[in-house]
Image (spheres, rainbow, N blue to C red):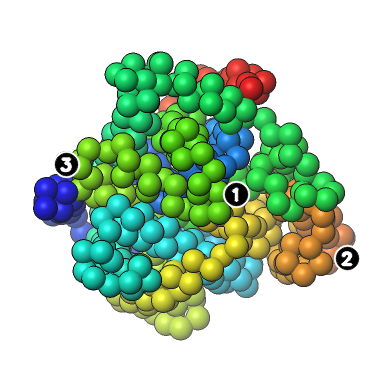
Amino acid sequence: MVAFISFFVFTAFVAAYSSWKLRKDNFSTKDGYFLGGRSLTGIVIAGSLLLTNISTEHLVGMNGDAYKHGAIIVAWEVTSALALVAAALYFAPRYLQMGLTTIPEFLEKRFDGLTRTIIAFLLIISFVSTLLPIVLYSGAISIEQIFDISGLLGITQTEGLWLTVIVVGFIGAVYAIFGGLKMVAYTDTINGFGLLVAGISIPLLALWNIGDGNMMEGLRLVFEKAPEKFNVVSDEVSVGPGSRDAIMPFGVLFTGLIINQLYFWTMHQSIIQRVLGAVSLKEAQKGLLYAGLLKILVPLIIVLPGIIAFYYFNDTFYDKKELVYPSLVKKVLPFWMTGFFVAVLMGAILSTFNSALNSAATIFSLGIYKRYINKNANEKRLVKIGKSTSALLALFAIGIAPFIAHAPRGLYQLLQQLNGIFFIPMATVILAGFFLPKVSAKAAKVGLLFGLLFYIFTNFIWQVDMHYVHIWGIEFVLNIGVMLLVSHFHPRTNSFSITNIGVVDVTQWKYAKGFSIFLVLATLAVYIFLGNVG
């Protein structure tokens, strides 16, 4: 009962505080609903970015991978800081100068309306088919395991999972539908603080218990049990037999991972929408770079617990990696803290879920509905359509989520592998839009189609003996080649230049470059100091 009370108290506090803070905001306008009135500050942006990115697919999926394969999985996190530096110094200034509402809007300015529409559809499909269901499923697994929903209600685990998915999905949809981006961002900030407190408490409590009150002694014992699990440089093969089953070969950091990180942190709508909602470039840069620092520290929450779990459970959960993090939480967390932890976990689920819903609604309402269905729609109508879109997509995600249980790979690896279908072709086109002025609109569309077919064929049909992240790198290079070739025969006909339309102040933050250098050095330090462990 105490656990349930603490759960409801914290959850209610987040909802009540956010609603009170936003009581005077106008959510009936396009900018008010979709971009938070362009009023987000650096701290809010950083907290929202962290929670939008870190959800249960990280807590459950990455800790599961760390439990079995060790710290090599940190590459997904620490290299994000480099992409966030690029976002702060290059992309954010240009997005805010153009006054964009969505990334597809840039593609229309640079290429044409059809390119924008194709990207918009691909983004919505990627949200519904990959991110939303996996976030719901991984969250439901954790809540079911920690609270034992099925045992309390006297139902099967499958029924408990369905029930949890439906409840979490419903609550997430309510937040996204009625609060818009600013409600999502504010709840993210509060839940972000809660996640840091609750998340770091798990490894600290575990090390305290293992070391009999001495956390450093606990860390020493965990290290001595399996020193190789602390090594961040993998010796897995990335090409040839066995490469398809590898988790994170070191070589892939220099090929497709670069492109993936650039896409996610500088071009993905659910991330960049926070930047587009910034009150100024200065605040956008603060938010992005603060988030970069958090990404370097966040392995303490989503990697270290997995390694500690190996100390407790040995290889017991090797075939059920998604159960290891909930099991560790139940083992080390005092019962009175369980409700608070699940509330924070719920916040992490809702953040990513809400963000994806809000981004998909923005893209559909402004990029598809107003362009093709009702060109004369006023702002109130667009907001209403956005809310309806969020509700419909939430229902789709709830229906799909429980079937993720049949996925043969780890949750986080599955998410990344599926994301490759959409991310790399879109990244290629957007990067070409910025850096290759000769690429034409026709070439962009051919590049998109080629990239989609190439990845699906080589990763799912032909299944070449190569790690999927390497395939991303090859796909990127081939996409660029295809687009340049098509542009040679079908040259660009439109003109495009980035101009400041004066939507927000675009004065640079004076510490942006210094902070960026620090993040680059910190990222390198992780690999220098942990690259030869064990």
Q: Is residue 254 left or right of residue 426?
A: right
Q: Nearer the viewer, mark 2 or mark 1?
A: 1
The local crowd at label 2, few if under 14, some if 14 to 19, many if 20 or more residues have their Cα within 10 Å, is few
Q: Is residue 309 above or below residue 429?
A: above
Q: Nearer the viewer, residue 314 or 260?
A: 314
Residue in view at x 47 percent, y 33 percent: 311
SS for dot 3:
helix
Q: Quadrant of residue 47?
A: top left
Quote the CA–CA distance across marks 1 and 3. 41 Å
Which of 226/233 is in front? Answer: 226
Residue 196 visible in the current orientation:
no
Type of residue at label 2? Phe
Label at residue 26: none
Label 2: which secondary element: helix
Q: How far across and how far down the image is residue 486, in percent?
A: 84, 64
Q: Earlier in the sequence, mark 2 or mark 1?
A: 1
Q: CA distance from mark 2 to mark 1?
A: 28 Å
Residue at image coords 31%, 49%: 345
C-beta proximity under 8 Å, tags 1 and 3: no
- Report the amino acid beneath label 3: Trp
Q: Secondary structure at mark 1?
A: helix
Given residues 512 and 209, the one toward you in this image is 209
Q: Residue at x 37, y 76 (%)?
A: 395
Q: Which residue is mark 1?
A: 263
Q: Is residue 125 above or below residue 98?
A: below
